[in-house]
């Protein structure tokens, strides 16, 4: 996949054909910490530099570097999809919440 880990933080990586460089962006942080490089080796190096600068700035300003998550979010979907999800959850003996949480967990595990 296009997820890498640098110093314990996950970043999503994409190739930007316009500038012919890889672009990495850390996820789960309180602010932007992105980085660019032409090679994978340079990408890791630039990522470490970007992350260190971001963490130093957070420490200097007394800001927590990582986002906090409440564990709640709203999902909007087509009513037919909502009904299908309720039926699928019921067929597995789960509540809709349990079923959605398991689907998200499985998808996230497969993306990493």
Image (cartoon, rainbow, N blue to C red):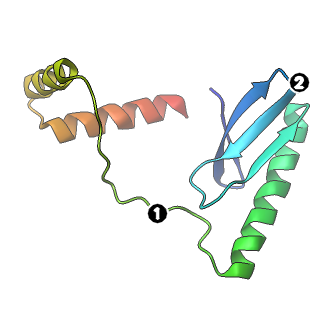
Asked if 84 appears above or below 56 in the picture, the reply is above
Which image quadrant: the N terminus? top right
**Is 49 left or right of 55, judged from the image as shown?**
right
Residue at numbered disc 1: 68
> Residue at 28% across / 34% down in the picture?
76
Label 2 sits on residue: 20
Q: Give coordinates of residue 8: x percent, y percent.
A: 65, 54
51 relative to 39, above or below = below
Please tell me which residue lies in front, 48 or 64: 64
In which image quadrant can residue 3 be found? top right
Could you tell me which residue is drawn at 35 percent across and 60 percent down? 70
Exactly how many numbered labels are in the figure?
A: 2
Q: Secondary structure at mark 1?
A: loop
Quarter of the picture holding the C terminus: top right
Question: Who's the residue at 70% across and 44% down the image?
Answer: 25
Q: Is 16 placed left or right of 89 in the picture?
A: right
Relative image position of residue 4 (x, y in whole percent): 68, 39
x, y (%) of residue 55? Answer: 73, 68
- Label 2: state its secondary structure: loop
Q: Are marks 2 and 1 in contact (CB under 8 Å)?
A: no
In the shown orientation, is residue 41 left or right of residue 25?
right
Crowding at dot 1, Cα within 10 Å, few <14 / some 14-19 / many 20+, comes out as: few
**Residue drawn 71% across the image and 34% down it:** 13
Name above or below for residue 101 compared with residue 72. above
Q: CA distance from mark 2 to mark 1?
A: 34 Å
Give the mark nearest the N terminus, 2 or 1: 2
User: Residue 14: horizontal and vertical position, in percent?
Assistant: 72, 29
Q: Residues within 10 Å of mark 2 (few under 14, many from 20)?
A: few
- Which image quadrant is residue 61 in? bottom right
Image position of 62 (left or right of 71): right
Marking on residue 23: none
């Amino acid at each position: 996949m296009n997820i890498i880990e640098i110093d314990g933080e996950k970043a999503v990586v994409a190739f930007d054909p316009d500038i012919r460089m890889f672009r990495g962006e850390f996820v789960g942080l309180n602010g932007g910490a992105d980085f660019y490089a032409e090679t994978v080796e340079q990408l890791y190096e630039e990522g470490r530099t970007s992350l260190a600068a971001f963490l130093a700035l957070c420490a200097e300003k007394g800001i927590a570097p990582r986002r906090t998550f409440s564990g709640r979010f709203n999902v909007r979907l087509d009513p037919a999809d909502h009904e299908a999800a309720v039926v699928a959850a019921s067929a597995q003996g789960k509540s809709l919440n349990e079923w959605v949480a398991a689907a998200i967990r499985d998808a996230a595990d497969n993306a990493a």
